[in-house]
Amino acid sequence: MSAADISLQQGIRFELDAVCPHTGARAGRLHTRHGIVETPVFMPVGTQATVKGLTQDHLSGLGARLILANTYHLFLRPGHEIIAQLGGLHRFMDWDRAILTDSGGYQAFSLSALTKFSEEGVMFRSHLNGDPHLFTPESTIDVQLALDSDIVMVLDECLPYPSGHEAARQAMLRTVRWARRSFEHYRLQPLASSAGAVFPIVQGSMFGDLRRDCARALTDLDAPGYAIGGLSVGEPRTLSSEMVEATAPELPVSRPRYAMGVGAPDFAPRTGGRLPSPAHRERGWG
């Protein structure tokens, strides 16, 4: 497939240049408000608006075009209002290329002793001082719009491994409901047409049927891109690969795909490649 489908939606445009007929691997270009990102790409993690041990000049010199920051941590300090007053996250961290922000859904998993889920959202007890903070599908959109990131992630429910099928099904259904609320709220914002793109996240734990059901439900949102979440939560690496294989065929061909928590380029779902240890959290795209 050559220079084909182009998606023009919500702050990004994706050009799919080629698909490998044997593995399904894709090559494309993601046009953002802060430059072009060639895919596949691995995204350095700058959780608190900085990649540890590297300056921005180092990152630019290495060719990084897209980095990640985290809504939960930036909400706690210095606060999204302060970052907005200073001109947004790009100016705050002196980065003129693309930024993706996590919603806090993964922190609800990794800090599970400090969180409580309800249909309304996730109640966090700050790991800094214990103060309570409610994250809802709507509020996480508001925080990320204040940060002015290029790609905004919806709030989702990520389960640990192993989890039972029914628990995974309920979390998957809640993730879909939250994604719909997130998009409804986003589309009501007066600056939505010029803001960052919003991506829903496919969940379903390690059950292929739930992954497929979730992906099909989320495609109804006609989102500008989709993420495959719930990986690197303690499962065997081969199982991570199987879940990506179960999910990817259900996602729109013309939209970018974000495999969360992949970690390194030796992850190759179709060819049986291995994954690195969960400590390596860089994100993969295709």
Image (tube, rainbow, N blue to C red):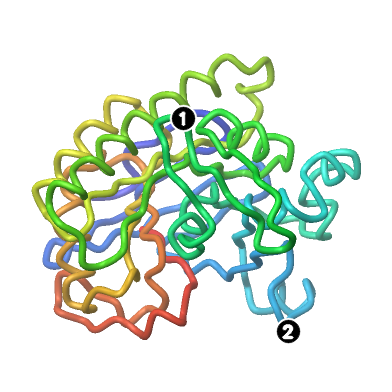
Percent position of residue 13, x then y: 49, 38
Write the residue at 18% across / 43% down: 169
Percent position of residue 170, x then y: 23, 40
Along the viewing direction, whichever of 16 and 148 lies nearer the viewer: 148
Marks 1 and 2 sit apart, C-alpha to C-alpha, by 38 Å
Percent position of residue 164, x then y: 15, 57
Q: Which mark is residue 120?
A: 1
Q: From the image, which quarter does the C terminus lie in?
A: bottom left
Estimate how packed mark 1 is, as few (under 14), some (14 to 19) or many (20 or more) residues with alpha carbons within 10 Å: few
Q: Which mark is residue 53?
A: 2
Q: Amino acid at mark 1?
A: Glu
Q: Is residue 76 positioned above or below 194 on the image?
A: below
**Sequence-wise first label, 1 or 2:** 2
Q: Is residue 57 positioned above or below 18 on the image?
A: below
Q: Quadrant of residue 179?
A: top left
Left or right: 97 as drawn, with respect to 121: right
Q: Amino acid at mark 2?
A: Gly
Please tell me whether mark 2 sits on a helix, a strand or a loop: loop
Instruction: Report if the CB atoms under discs 1 and 2 are less than 8 Å apart.
Output: no
